[in-house]
Image (cartoon, grey):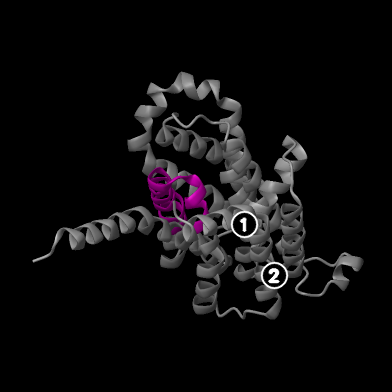
Amino acid sequence: MFNSHDEAKRSDLLTGILNWGPLLVPPLLWAGNFVIGRYIRHDIPPMTLAFARHLIALLCLLPFCYRPMYQYFAQYRALRWHLIGTALTGLAGFNLCIYVGLQSTVASNGLLLNSTIPVLIVILATMLYGHKLRINQAAGLIISCVGVLTIILHGDFSRLISLQFSHGDLIVFLGMICFTFYSLWLRYIPADVNRIGLFGFQLLIATLFLAPFFAWEYASGLRVIWTVGSVSAMLYVAIAASLAATFLYMTGVARIGSARAGVYIHLIPLYGVVLSTLFLGETIHYYHAAGLAAILAGLTAYNWDQISASLTKRTNPV
């Protein structure tokens, strides 16, 4: 027999699993997107993969999203510029840059550069929207930027003087900038807008935008080598990395809020480095660890006020 205290503990544990559990999966699926993009690079041209990802995801989602897309069309039309902006940056631009960049850089670099997104959000918010920075926040940004340069320059800062950058790293970094704009512009879409219909329109816009890139690549003679692996890769990036990850992340945000859910994004590099080591045989170099450590240290410094307040609240409960 269990007493009421034991039942309450089991209930709290179950609630915690339901709230936090779903958020452990999306970073794993998103990390797999980088690994797949690198692994399949010789079988699927990058622009074709980006186009196929959004087309397949749209076709799979259509039975569920066509009704809200039609029902709330006037609302989406009023938000058309935000729809177009978020679709072209967070979906089309981000994934196109990732797949093109992974043709000439390892997945580990791309995954670690993914950690720059929170830093870039703050930098652009400061530059474009007048966001005020405190001393610890400015210091955190500088430390994080050093971490980014450590990864891009492979630990050799003399490359900065001679402007010797990895072509693939720069393209992947451009993708991170695209996703940063997506994150900033997404805030202007009201919370009460139906998310299924919103995602449907974003996929539609991204697919239409990527179609000419796919056509150009196809006309250039770059074709898919059809194998079980290439088909599986297309299905993974469309269904797992796009639909399943997005649905689970939205579920987690609805349960615990976007601020706390966003912390789980930092699991992407951890998952990704493990996956790229296991499945791609990539070697983790000292500059990977040093760069990631600097980025995380910078993020900690930037958020130190909130961290300190949280620790104080826990040690001094009211």
Q: CA distance from mark 1 to mark 2?
A: 19 Å
Q: Is residue 295 above or below residue 212?
A: below
Which comes before the other along the chain, label 1 or label 2?
1
In the picture as drawn, the residue positioned furthest to the right comes out as 161
Q: In which image quadrant can residue 161 be found?
A: bottom right
Residue 37 on image: x %, y %? 55, 62
Say which element carries label 1.
helix
Classify residue 131 by image quadrant. Answer: top right
Mark 2: give few (<14), some (14-19) or many (20+) Cα within 10 Å: many
Q: Nearer the viewer, mark 1 or mark 2?
A: 2
Tell me, yes or no, whether the highlighted magenta stretch contains residue 258. yes
Determine which residue is flagged by label 1.
Answer: 98
For the record, the magenta segment spans 236-265
Above or below, 210 against 173 in this view is above
Label 1 crowd (10 A; few <14 / some 14-19 / many >=20): many
Write down the residue under mark 2: 291
Report if residue 52 lies within the magenta region: no
Q: Nearer the viewer, residue 89 or 300?
A: 300
Instruction: Give, as a three-letter code, the residue at label 2.
Output: Gly
Q: Is residue 225 visible?
A: no
Q: Secondary structure at mark 2?
A: helix
Q: Amino acid at mark 1?
A: Ile
The image position of residue 44, as x and y in percent, is 55, 60
Query: Is 224 located above or below residue 156 in the figure?
Result: above
Give how far across and how far down residue 142 sits, in percent.
Answer: 77, 59
